[in-house]
Image (cartoon, rainbow, N blue to C red):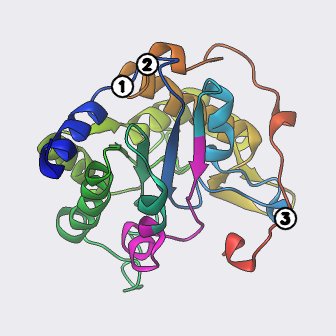
Amino acid sequence: MSVTRRQVALGALAAVPLRAGRRDRTLYIAGDSTAAQKYSTEAPETGWGMALPFFLRRGVRVANHAVNGRSSKSFVDEGRLDAILAAIRPGDLLLVQFAHNDEKIADPTRYTEPWTTYQDYLRLYIEGARAHGARPVLATPVERRRFDADGNAVPTHGDYPAAMRALARQERVALLDIEALSLALWQRLGVEETKVYFNWTDTEQDNTHFNPPGAIAVARLVARESARTRVLAPGDVVRLRDEIPTSWITWPEATDASDVL
């Protein structure tokens, strides 16, 4: 088989979920601070990627490459996508969630325009994963905690979720619509109860980042939607109906100052 045909075959294999137990594989996360690993100096702030392993069987490992403050552009420009692609293997998954920092129009190192450069950068993740026989998965950005005067949860990401949905359809990429799911969850919980899920402390009222209950809730959305869309096989996802103790969340010491930037 030629290299070209082999790559095509591997790409086709990665386009469907592997059956649970067929082989161990890794789910890579490329994203921003809402998903990122947090360290002891940042507790109780918690990225949803820290809680995702609680909902996956042991044979599906999570490699959380999400980093605070990154956009789809800056993540690529800093070589972080290249680092993932150097490690990713056929049958692995690359889950991509960006927008929070793409929206920062005053910062040219991070800003992307939803319908042009944002989609252009997302294509780099899609094409990179496919070239390595892995499966790309797009996840719309989790919503911030924002309510109008009538107590309705309101979207905060402008056209970015719509641009990602359109790209997913165009490129035939699996989409986890976490923006819509999280907005519905915040609406159901309401103005006061959502404070329990975000990083609200005595000294900070953070409506973007999560504490352990919030990270667990969003990770549950990601796992449930991954099973519903057949990104993961039903047997790959566990504990969807279980109460996950917040004590399972731990914040290790940072080994490098860049870990917390």
Residue occupying image coordinates x 87% and y 58%: 202
Expressed as whole percent of the image width and height from the top left, the position of residue 1 reads 15, 41
Numbered disc in front, either 1 or 3: 1
Q: Earlier in the sequence, mark 3 or mark 2?
A: 3
Q: Is residue 188 visible?
A: yes
243 magenta-colored:
no
Compared with 218, 7 (above or below) is below
- Disc 2, SS: loop
Give how far apart the Cα atoms at labels 1 and 3 are. Answer: 44 Å
Query: Going 85% across and 66% down the picture, which residue do you hit?
Result: 41
Label 3: few (<14), some (14–19) or many (≥20) C-alpha neighbours in 10 Å: few
Would you name the residue on which mark 1 appears?
17
Q: Are marks 2 and 1 in contact (CB under 8 Å)?
A: yes
Q: Which residue is mark 2?
A: 233
Q: Amino acid at mark 2?
A: Ala
Crowding at dot 2, Cα within 10 Å, few <14 / some 14-19 / many 20+, comes out as some
Residue 100 x %, y % = 46, 62
Q: Is residue 109 left or right of residue 32?
A: left
Q: Is residue 194 visible?
A: no
Magenta segment:
62-82
- Residue 232 is situated, as x and y percent measured from the top left of the image, at 43, 25
Q: Which residue is mark 3?
A: 203
**Which amino acid type is marked by label 1?**
Pro
Disc 3 to disc 2, C-alpha distance:
42 Å
- Tell me the quarter of the picture where residue 205 sits: bottom right
Between 196 and 91, the one lying in front of the other is: 91
In the drawing, does residue 138 fall left or right of residue 44?
left
